[in-house]
């Protein structure tokens, strides 16, 4: 089996690639990634020790490069995307180009090369903010941010390729991931690394927004389960087993790193900030998957990982990162 993984140098994609390389030494795994600011080229270097691994530096917006990469493969797992909500508020255009057009290029190449399995990685943000209960796969899609709207578009285009062309597409919609190798612009790694550096932790609005956190290893196991047992044309929610307001997560990080509570600072809220995400994972659980980690143990593991791997994240908090934050807080 030859598998193409797009976005395999990013947070979830690199965790998933690591899992697949270890679990399937006989499969040939190729990562296709543009190595944007969000990527982690060091993991690609680490993967080169596996004889079944290869890497293509390429952009999903480039039709010819995509076509060449997909040619000869049996399956595609499509992670590559612009992934940060705050950046989509500052600069929506690239989210449409990459997430919508880029995904469409992937699907078109998959159709032309008769790909046998296409897993599209979507998100719980397609459901929008959830007042009560939990989102199920058949709920109406009501995305809020340009990021979420671009992901909703790509999710629906992927399903259209199943309905129209019978391309064997499967969609996973997961909740907020956290764990090793997540870029420090995102909430949990930003707060951990800021606390380690003795900087303030900028909590948006009243800090009572709720996210349905999932440890990245659990999400990767879910994607692998869907890869083996998922049914073409179906959507699978992948949620963690906890709903936690940001302010409590921040408090736990501060406590574990033995920092004063005063480093937590309330700042201007994100525009159109979704209040709550909550997923029902009943459907994927019928395939035999369930999360292995509790939120408490996974957060502890994650904090320890960032304490030990300062070299990895401090390289990502350089000038470009500081310039982005200046723009974001204007
Ligand atoms: P990430 O930002 O950490 O990584 C994205 C990867 O995609 C990077 O390696 C980047 O270089 C690559 N990439 C970006 N634009 C590209 C392009 N034009 N061509 C080729 N490669 C490109 O993202 P992540 O958090 O790992 O998310 C991966 C996927 O999972 C995304 O599709 C995201 O929407 C989805 N998702 C993320 C979460 C989460 O909590 N992080 C939750 C649900 C769904
Ligand atoms: O729900 C899945 C989504 O989770 C994915 O599709 C996205 O790719 C991923 O980035 C993530 O989106 P969020 O917007 O939920 O994650 P983020 O880490 O940006 O923020 C988590 C929460 O923390 C959110 O309520 C905003 C808040 N926050 C975030 C930052 C960066 C703060 O209070 N302060 C901050 O500085």
Image (cartoon, helix red, strand yellow):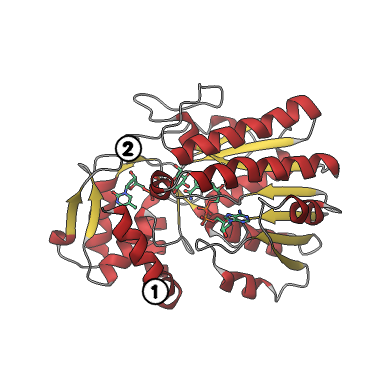
Q: Secondary structure at mark 1?
A: helix
Mark 2: which secondary structure?
A: loop
The residue sitting at 47% across, 27% down in the picture is 135
Residue 22, quarter of the rendered image = bottom right
- Closest to the observer: 289 or 315? 315
Residues 44 and 57: in front is 57
Residue at the location (37% across, 71% down)?
319
Quadrant of the frame with the N terminus: bottom right
Q: Nearer the viewer, residue 91 or 111?
A: 91
Q: Is residue 253 left or right of residue 168?
A: left
Mark sitting earlier along the chain (2/1): 2
* Any part of residue 290 in sight: no
Disc 2 versus disc 1: distance between alpha carbons?
A: 28 Å
Residue 111 shows up from this direction:
yes
Q: Residues within 10 Å of mark 1 (few under 14, many from 20)?
A: few
Residue tagged by mark 2? Answer: 273
Image position of 213 with respect to 21: above or below:
above
Label 1 near label 2: C-beta < 8 Å?
Answer: no
Q: Which residue is mark 1?
A: 314
């Amino acid at each position: 089996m030859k598998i193409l993984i797009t976005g395999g140098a990013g947070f979830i994609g690199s965790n998933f690639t690591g899992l697949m390389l270890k679990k399937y030494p006989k499969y040939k795994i190729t990562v296709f990634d543009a190595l944007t600011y969000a990527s982690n080229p060091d993991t690609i270097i680490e993967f080169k020790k596996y004889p079944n691994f290869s890497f293509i530096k390429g952009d999903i917006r480039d039709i010819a490069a995509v076509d060449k990469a997909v040619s000869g493969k049996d399956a595609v797992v499509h992670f590559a995307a612009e992934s940060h909500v705050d950046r989509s508020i500052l600069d929506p255009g690239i989210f449409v180009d990459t997430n919508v057009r880029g995904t469409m290029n992937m699907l078109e190449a998959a159709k032309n090369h008769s790909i046998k399995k296409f897993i599209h990685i979507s998100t719980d943000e397609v459901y929008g903010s959830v007042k009560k209960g939990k989102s199920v796969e058949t709920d109406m899609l009501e995305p809020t941010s340009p990021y979420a709207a671009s992901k909703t578009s790509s999710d629906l285009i992927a399903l259209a390729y199943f309905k129209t062309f019978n391309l064997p597409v499967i969609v996973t919609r997961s909740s907020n991931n956290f764990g090793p190798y997540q870029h420090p612009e995102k909430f949990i790694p930003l707060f951990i690394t800021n606390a380690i550096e003795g900087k303030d932790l900028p909590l948006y609005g009243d800090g009572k927004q709720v996210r349905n956190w999932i440890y990245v290893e659990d999400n990767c196991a879910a994607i692998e389960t869907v890869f083996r047992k998922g049914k073409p044309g179906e959507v699978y929610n992948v949620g963690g087993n906890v709903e936690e307001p940001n302010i409590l997560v921040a408090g736990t990080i501060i406590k574990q790193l033995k920092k004063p509570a005063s480093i937590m600072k309330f700042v201007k809220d994100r525009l159109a900030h979704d209040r709550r995400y909550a997923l029902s994972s009943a459907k994927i659980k019928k395939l035999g998957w369930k999360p292995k980690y509790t939120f408490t143990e996974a957060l502890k593991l994650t904090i320890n990982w960032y304490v030990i791997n300062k070299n990895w994240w401090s390289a990502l908090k350089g000038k470009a990162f500081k310039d982005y934050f200046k723009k974001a807080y204007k």
